[in-house]
Amino acid sequence: MNTTRSSPRVLVVDDEADLRELLEITLLKMGLDVDSAENLAQARSLLAQHDYALVLTDMRLPDGLGLELVREVSAAFRNTPIAVVTAYGSTDNAVVALKAGAFDYISKPVALDQLRMMVQSALRLNAPPSESSSAPKAPSRLRGESAVIQALRAQIARLARSMAPIAITGESGSGKELAAREVHAQGSRSAKPFIAVNCGAIPEALMEAEFFGYRKGAFTGAQDERDGFFQAANGGTLMLDEVADLPLPMQVKLLRAIQERRVRKIGATVEEPVDVRIISATHKNLEKLVDEGHFRQDLFYRLNVIELALPPLRDRLDDLEVLTDAILERLGTFDQKVRLGPGVLETLRSYSFPGNVRELENILERALAFANDGVIEVRDLALKGARLADTPPGYLPPPELEGIESPAWARAPEAAAAAITSAHEGANTFNSAVNIAAPAPALAAADSPPAVQNMPPLPPLDILPSNLPEYLAMVEREIIQRALAQTQYNRTQAASLLGISFRQLRYQMQKLNIQEPDS
């Protein structure tokens, strides 16, 4: 093959002489070498003779469809991006081409500014090392070496070379934004902005202004002109997180912006071109929302050109140790490294992680607040036992007080239940219950746990607290205050009395705003 030319070479395939000439002139002015073909046969012949930095083909040709060329180039010339020219309004053809492997598309009548931006994006894909960053490649944001995560990274590497919209699906906390950032970082737009937008966090009345911007004086309070998300992401990637939360009126406007690649600021009279790659994400079932009439079908097809499904953490537990190490490294300080105690990793492996990687981060961060000397023990995890598959080896139960026999409340659950029932008797309402200061003498003082003696009685069995968190916080504060009072505010002894670590007690005191009395 002839590879002696220094300028990138582009192949234009179109049977309309006027359009073909317009494309050729525009590309030549960009400093590119251009070959042209009128049909599929000529295009195939030229592809066999030359290497191309970009192939630009019409969808309808005299001897076939441009879609055939898209499939052939995608299969035989994986490093050659191919873009299609579609008739005005034929966005369905564009979606089909993108699904078949097209790099991008442009609609007739061809807007030359959009054509130039598309060509520049394509040329950056195969730019020689001297033209790209010489910095070492950053490690993947998606940590792990399991088979499923390796397959995901390989898929992202392929998708990064395309401009096709990507719909990322996965449970909450599975890393959808990380995956979107990885696609952006590996693509030709990595040097341009990445803008992530939480669609569910924007008030409906402000959505149009936030997405498309506004002119000065467009409405009350618009003292200056402002760009929207589309303008801010121009040349780069716009991630629409929780896209299912978009109201229907905004879905119509978003669809037009994606199809036309133009937006109009509020108060403006003309549209401006924007060049963004759209990545959407949601944990909801968009197809179901389409069937229910809550999400537009045409927008769904425009966003869901390529689907990228993220696995839940429970399906990639082989990566748990790698993920845990990365999180602990981030949580550690210069003078104290965080590590796991015996049995902790095994306990984590037996957990279902309904909140996925985000929940793992929260669990470890919370456990570190309770841990002593930066060593996280099983008891610091505070995982609900009902969610554990079994009790793993190395499990460390809460410490028992030396030399003290377990009291009746710990030995006989039915006795404690009887105590609670007795405490309910005579109480008429929840409000009256929490205001009663006198204890409910259900168990003998010697058999009651120190923190339970003289506790505020529980609400009646037939009445539930109107605010459970506040009620539980009140009970917890009472328990801790009584333990502190019994130990003359010796927090080490109080923590031992309650079966928790000193750090846990300090954390709870700060959380509940428990202060030591002035001496």
Image (tube, rainbow, N blue to C red):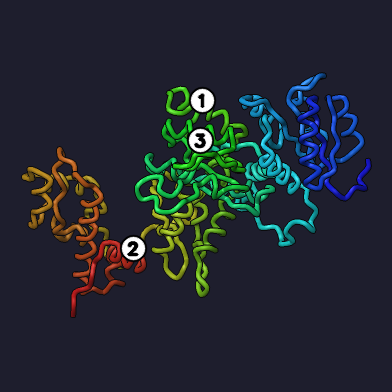
Q: Which residue is label 2 attached to?
A: 500
Q: On the rendered structure, is 454 left or right of 151?
A: left
Q: Label 1 amino acid?
A: Gln
Gap in angstroms between the C-alphas marked 1 and 2? 54 Å
Secondary element type, mark 1: helix
Q: Position of residue 32 (x, y in %)?
A: 82, 45
Q: Quadrant of residue 166?
A: top right
The mark closer to the camera, 1 or 2, is 1
Q: Which residue is label 3 attached to?
A: 254
Q: On the rendered structure, is 470 left or right of 95?
A: left
Q: On the rendered structure, is 360 left or right of 446?
A: right
Task: Tell me what residue is drawn at x 50 percent, y 67 percent.
Answer: 332
Q: Nearer the viewer, residue 414 or 112?
A: 112
N-term-proximal mark, 2 vs 3: 3
Secondary element type, mark 3: helix
Q: On the rendered structure, is 400 left or right of 70?
A: left
Q: Residue furthest left?
A: 426
- Mark 3 residue crowding within 10 angstroms, few (<14) / some (14–19) / many (20+): some
Residue 389 visible, this angle: no
The mark closer to the camera, 2 or 3, is 3
Q: Which residue is label 1 attached to?
A: 297
